[in-house]
Amino acid sequence: MAADLVLTIVLNGLTLAALYFIVASGFSLIFGLMRTVNMAHGALYLIAGYAGYAVFEPLYDQDVWWAWYAGVAWGVVVAAVVGTVMQKFLLGWMQGQELRQALVTIGVSIIVADQLLAFYGGNPRQFFAPDAIFGASAVPGVGNYPTFRLVQIGIAVAVGVALWVILNKTKLGLMVRAGVDDREMLAACGVNVPLVAIAVFALGAGLAGLGGVIGSTAQPLSQGMDGRFLLIALVVVIVGGMGSITGTALGAVMIGLAEQIGQALFPTYSVILTFVIMVAVLALRPQGLLGRATP
Amino acid sequence: MKTKITRRTAILGASATAVAAGTFKLAAPAIAQNAPIKLGGVATLEGPFATGGQDGYRCVTMELERRNWTIAGRRVEFIRESSNAQADVALARARKLIEQDNVDMILGPLSGAEGIALRDYSRTLTGKSIINGSSGAADTTLRNPSPNFFRFNTDGTQWMAGLGNHVRRVMNIQDVAIVAGDYAFPYAQVFGFNIEFCRAGGRVQHYWAPLGTTDFGAQIAQINRSNARALVVVHGGTDGLAFMTQYAQAGGQLPLIGGSIMADATMLSSRGPHRRLMVGMISGGPIADINDDPMWRDYVARYRARWLNEGGFQSPSIHGVNYATNLQGIIAGLEAVSGDLSGNQAAFQRAMSAAKFKNPMGADVSLDHNRQAVSDIFLNRIEERDGRAQTVAFERARQINQTLGVPEAQFMALGAPSRDNPGCVAA
Amino acid sequence: MTPARTTVISLIGLAVLVVAPLVLLAILPQNQAQFWTSNILGRGLVFGLIALSLTFLATYGGFISLAQMTVAGVAGYTVAVLTQGAVPTIVGGLPYALTIPAGLFASVLAGLLIGAISVKTRDIYLLMITLALAMGVFRFVETNIAWFNGYEGIRNVVGPDIFGLSFRSTYVFYYSVVASCAVLYFGILYLVRSPFGLVLQGIRDNPRRVSALGYNVGQHRIAAFGVAGFIAGCGGVLATIYNIGISPGSIGLGASVNILIISVIGGLGHPIGAFVGSIIFTVFDTFAATIYDRERFNTLIGLVFLIIVLVSPDGVVGLKGRLMALLKPKQAKEAKSP
């Protein structure tokens, strides 16, 4: 295989990993603080995609340059609001009953997917990135490469840095990290834990929403994407380590690369590669590569 | 929500009460001449393929409304069920229609695996018929056909008739790259293309993508480095949109040849940069948006008048026309026997086997010995007209049979289409 | 409920299932009676069996696995791949007398394997990992043509003749299903009172203590998944024959979640919940068009599921106890007031 083709495939893997990181980071964040497995993470992805598209489409028709940005912003906001509502009214009062929370979010995701189908129909949709980041750019050693895929990496890095800053340099982050270690003690210190929980849930859901619009620009937006991206979030977080943002990044890179390399080398069996990695990690390090051992 | 209105309208009147009342009450024997004909419908209204099923029911409803819910002097009750494009779900719905609702016949289903499942089920029935909706797997009627299963629409292999020759002989292209999904429907389409193209001396390179692939980056990178002079895209729906957008993004320039569901209204109604590339694309299939035939112009006008404000497309989709064509087959059969379904439907089934009619495209339809349609296939080009991309028929291959004119024994000897048997045999 | 009382209730339930086809024949026209027997009760019980494997794991081990439909699918696919007459022929050539045991063997192996992979995880971790495994198998089967015929799946698995009677006959099918359910259900009730069952329940309540007593927690867990694999396998074989074949959709995300829905609606507190839940689910599934709107079946079943999880986590079976608990304090209060 030519060197430039190998480089292209590696770059494809990294850009895909960037998308996976954006989607999985919110899942990992919520899990990290609240031990809530948000099975509706894929549903939030889908909600943001469709909501963002509803704003994007008329603007795109009018050739407004900021159509896509408006779609991104609206998608993130809607997902964050839906996440907040879920935490406030469905999950908050059963905090600590982790399994029951997971079941509730499964119920929510079934209903959401079906209602989205009722409102938006089964037609696939896709966002089209603004002209500035559409088309191809020259990448040394690769040749022309889709610009938007490079932008994906930029966004993922920005998300990663922002999360690091929030978690390590802000008061919210301090509370979140304390909450991971000991919720009761945090509450005893006078911190309004439910409010922190809502803030984290909104942030995590907003990230799912960001993933939804970015993902629906890179790939089509259609029914079934919710399950797909929920699964990706699960696998990335299982491989990388539960609740660790760095682990999520590592997991995303591994899965993204495995998917693209597998597709180029043995297309029919590429699907299993991802799961072989997952099973291997579970066998050797059940808590994930960078996860802390659970008590 | 528009679909809901559609649904209500569809079961308006007698059928609504029948659906509501038929569940727990005793069903009256439906043999009597004045009793209504019970027509069951199975189409995909759930999940990712819902658009096609909705359009199928639109076209069926439109025709039944036009006939004032009466065929051959008998009232028609249309009992609709929906599946999610999965074989076992379609089977459960069909069983419910036959055994619980006691329908006389089923119109459906929509997708390949469902079609084969219902074909197998129809074999176990007596005095009932299953008439295909829009499923297009060749094997449903080609191998192990069932005496109770009828298909008045052409299949996925037939739809490619004429395309291979056009690319090789008219466009004078010798090397093509084919991108296709790695499952039965694309196999059938690729097979249909290759049979002609390779016989005419063409060479192909296949790029198969597992079902559900959404990132085609690796394939596109390889295609852009190959010596192919044209690109045959046999994806559809979500996969097609994903592939085309990514191909546009990667700066792809090759002339495009499309599979039948590439150029469907479902795909063309999505806007975006891929549309620019798709203008000029050649494709083959049973329908075209613009076809210079008075029957089709009239049909499209009626479709638009009825459905444009209720969620319909600008022009009926391939699934819509297939459901309508199969309904025509039922109507032709019923009219020939004056609505008499007695004798375990033997006379009705004979009448359907012998039916000849023109479908909405103005193409003659008749059935072969496997109860599979022989009909016309259109070569289409995508053009921008009235500010939107539309398929325009520029050539018609008349009376294409299921083996594309190859003698049946010879065609069967080629084996079933598959990834390892894509039909590329040089003459 | 005391064990004795449970057994009595279960036997009454079994008797009802045995006579149900006759009652249906008496009150409905023949074709509808057969429809209810085979496609409501029969189909419900088949999925009840698969749900039973999950309920068994959840009730006695505290494991909620989303991979039980997958395990059932392993049995179904094994039968479909090996059996004479299935279309397309992949291996083929073998009679049901061999392929059904082979299917059950494969499902036990699959159960053991899933148990081994997830042996160190509990609760939500287990839920996540089993879901990921289930989807991995589904995606593999859906994309693999050579072994599983991909998206189209394998058709024409019509089932064996039993004593010269075709399995496709409504009543042969139905009573085979009832017999399988009865054997497995009472087998579980027996098993959980055996030493193995007691250790399993000990693991559920306190794995460390069980470990300290000298039992190997991991081995018992894996064995429990093997037992569940056998139960799910029986359901999978019957479901495949009922559906005249199997395709990836049968083991997809929707199908896997449906098994969870069935178990949760019925109740995870007792094995009987699996059958209660599956009959409710099947009635909803079949008559959604009449009850609400066929196209919105998922919203309907999702709402039922959500309400059960929010209101009564131990399902419909637990609902009675919950209502009693609600009523009792009231009665007590009323009694106190003059």
Image (cartoon, grey):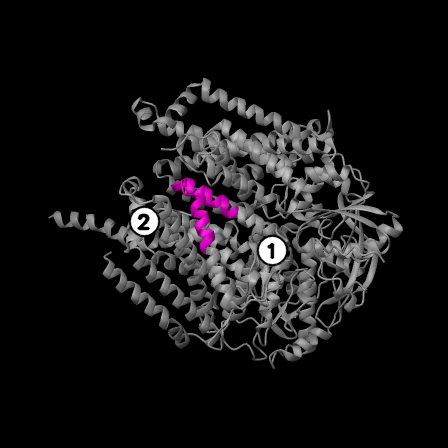
Name the amino acid type tagged 2. Answer: Leu
What residue sits right under mark 2 in the picture?
C200
What residue sits right under mark 1 in the picture?
C147
> Same subunit under labels 1 and 2?
yes
Where residue C32 sits: x, y (%)?
47, 72
Mark 2, secondary structure of its residue: helix
Q: Which of marks 2 and 1 precedes in the sequence?
A: 1
Q: Quadrant of the C terminus of chain B?
A: bottom right
Q: Residue drawn at (51%, 57%), measured in percent from left and top?
A: C294
Tell me the chief SS of the magenta region. helix
Identify the subunit bearing mark 1.
C
> Is B230 on the left or on the right of A113, as rendered?
right
**Residue in the foreground of this view, choosing between B268 and C166:** C166
> Mark number for residue A164?
none
Q: Which residues are magenta?
A: C108-135
Where residue B171 sits: x, y (%)?
87, 48
Q: How many marks?
A: 2
